[in-house]
Structure formats: structure tokens, C-alpha cells
Amino acid sequence: MIYWFSGTGNSRWVAEELAKRLGDRLMDIADCIVQGDFRHVLSRGESIGWVFPTYSWGPPPVVLDFISRWHIDGYEKGLTYCYMVTTCGDDVGLTADIFADALGYIDCVAAFSVQMPNNYILLPGFDTDPPALVQSKKERAVARVAGIAEMIAARKQTTDVVTGQYKWIKSRVIRPFFIKHLMGDSKFVADRSQCNSCGTCVAVCPMHNITLADGGLPQWHGRCAMCLGCIHRCPRHAIQYGKITRSKGRYHY
Ligand SMILES: Cc1cc2nc3c(=O)[nH]c(=O)nc-3n(C[C@H](O)[C@H](O)[C@H](O)COP(=O)(O)O)c2cc1C
Ligand code: SF4
Ligand code: SF4
């Protein structure tokens, strides 16, 4: 069983590739949260996989929130193989450690990272990758995911992640600040002159956090996971996050 969360499609692609190669089933974390579906059953010998993007050098808070409410029947300590795969633009800091702690009594014995095109554009200095880099990251990811699938099939126990420099400061100092002050949907706005009320943003939001108001413009309702799916997938580039994203690129897999 592969649990996945994704905003702009990178992690979803990884999860689907792994499911295909391993003959495994997929479980959409956002759907489970929206439907209140937190109790699942493993079949005998089945592994538990987790695939999600790195958010500020840690797992997305929405994934940790899911885990805090999740129950799995059929887990056998020492026998059930549990692994995580995180996609990132550059590096993941202490994501694997934070994730293993969050799982509690379930042992996450393997952690992998996959570099994919960056989708973080909300702070100065952060933008989408140039097209050539998007292309080369996607090409390298194909071989990387194939290699990860082989390691998973072999039940390999390893931590094979790009932590990057200053991992402690990034994950233990910057990350808590980021979560407290830089997450949330209050700065999302739609430009009335660009938005044609197509509803794409409503449809792609994994958290069901967007509706179209009477005038046809999107409204955000405070259940945002900061996945950036809405801002990147609006076909009219009508969505901004304050003023900072006006000059930024857009990306989705
Ligand atoms: C809120 C947020 C924080 C991010 N923080 C990091 C980070 O700490 N390190 C990194 O390399 N990429 C970071 N990224 C980039 C994403 O991890 C990367 O683009 C990922 O592949 C997106 O996955 P998705 O398409 O499945 O949503 C961040 C993206 C978002 C939206
Ligand atoms: S996706 Fe863009 S154009 Fe479509 S309704 Fe949302 S903001 Fe408007
Ligand atoms: S509102 Fe936008 S950024 Fe927030 S969860 Fe929905 S799609 Fe993602």
C-alpha cells in the first residue's frame, strides 16, 4: 500500500511509477483526510510506502496530521517493510528523521529522496527551474525511481537521501518558523481581469479548500496544505500569492 500526497504532480508521478513497478495499490492521503478515512488493513506480507514532497526540509504538515490520526491493522513489527520517498527541488534536510519519529511504533526502515522540478515560488529568491533543468531533472528521476523500486522490491534497509548542507538549522530552526508564519491561504488572490471562472483551481485542490464565489472568483477557506496546486495549475495565471508571484514561473508535472 503506497500512501501519497502531491500538489503539483511530482510525488503523484513517483507514487504511480512505484505502484506500477511493484504491483502495489495507491492510497491518496488528501482523499482519506477529506473523507475521514483513517483506518486501513494490510494484507499479509504487504509493505507500507509513503510518497510526499519535502516542505521546508521536513514532511508536509498535512501528512503528519494524517499520520497522527491513522490506524493500520495487520502491521507486524520486524516483518512489515515500511519506507518513505520524498520529492524535492534541491535537498531534504532531516525529513527522514522527522518522518520516522512521526510514525511512532511503526519502523520506517528505508528513506529515499528524488530531485524533481521545484514548485516553491512564494519567497524572494525562489522560482521555478529553467526549462532545461526541468527536463533534465525529469529525465534523471526516471532512472532514480526505477532504482528505488528495485531497492524496495529487495526490502533494502537504507537512508538514501540528499540532506544538503546545514540540515539541522534548516529542519529544526527554519522549518518551525516556516510552518508557523509562512503557511496558510490568506494571501491567495485571483485577478478579476484574468480569471474566467473555469473552476480548475476548485477541481485540483486536494483539500477541497476552494469554492467559486457568486462573482465567479475563487475563495480560499483556511484548510490549505500549501501544496501550491491551485497557483501552478490555473490556466490563466490568474492566481497570485500577494504580489511576490506576479513575476514567478508556474510548473506542474
Ligand atoms: C511549501 C513548500 C516547501 C518546499 N520546501 C522545499 C525544501 O525544503 N527543499 C526542497 O528541495 N524543495 C522544497 N519544495 C519543493 C518541492 O518539494 C518539490 O518541488 C516537490 O517535488 C513538489 O512535489 P509535488 O509536485 O508532488 O507537490 C517546497 C515546496 C513547497 C510547496
Ligand atoms: S483556475 Fe484560474 S481562471 Fe480558473 S477559476 Fe481558478 S483562478 Fe479562475
Ligand atoms: S488552496 Fe491551493 S495551495 Fe492550498 S491546498 Fe488547495 S490547491 Fe493546495
Image (tube, rainbow, N blue to C red):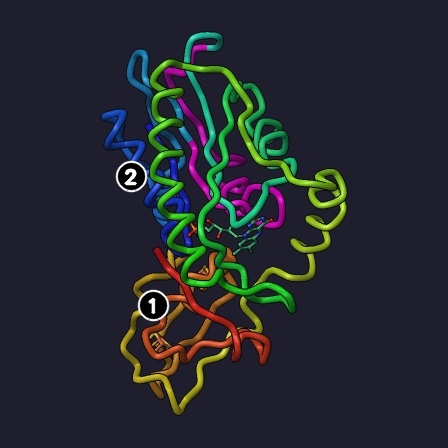
Q: Which residue is mark 1?
A: 202
Judging depth in this view, the residue of 144 and 228 nearest the camera is 144
| Residue in the picture at 65% in, 35% down | 94
- Expressed as whole percent of the image width and height from the top left, the position of residue 25 reads 26, 31
| Residue in the picture at 34% in, 39% down | 142
Q: Is label 2 in a helix, a strand or a loop?
A: helix
Judging depth in this view, the residue of 205 and 34 nearest the camera is 205
Q: On the picture, is 130 further left or further right than 3?
A: right
Amino acid type indicated by mark 1: Val
Query: Is the CB atom of the residue marked by disc 1 within 8 angstroms of ligand 2's nearest atom?
Result: yes
In magenta stretch: residue 72: yes
Dot 1 alpha-carbon crowd within 10 angstroms: few under 14, some 14 to 19, many 20 or more: many
In magenta stretch: residue 167: no
| Residue in the picture at 50% in, 42% down | 63
Looking at the rendering, the stretch of residues picked out in magenta corresponds to 50-76
Q: Is residue 167 visible?
A: yes
Q: Which residue is mark 2?
A: 16
Amino acid type indicated by mark 2: Glu
Quarter of the figure with the C terminus:
bottom left
Q: On the picture, is 72 further left or further right than 110?
A: left
Residue 91 lies in what quarter of the image? top right
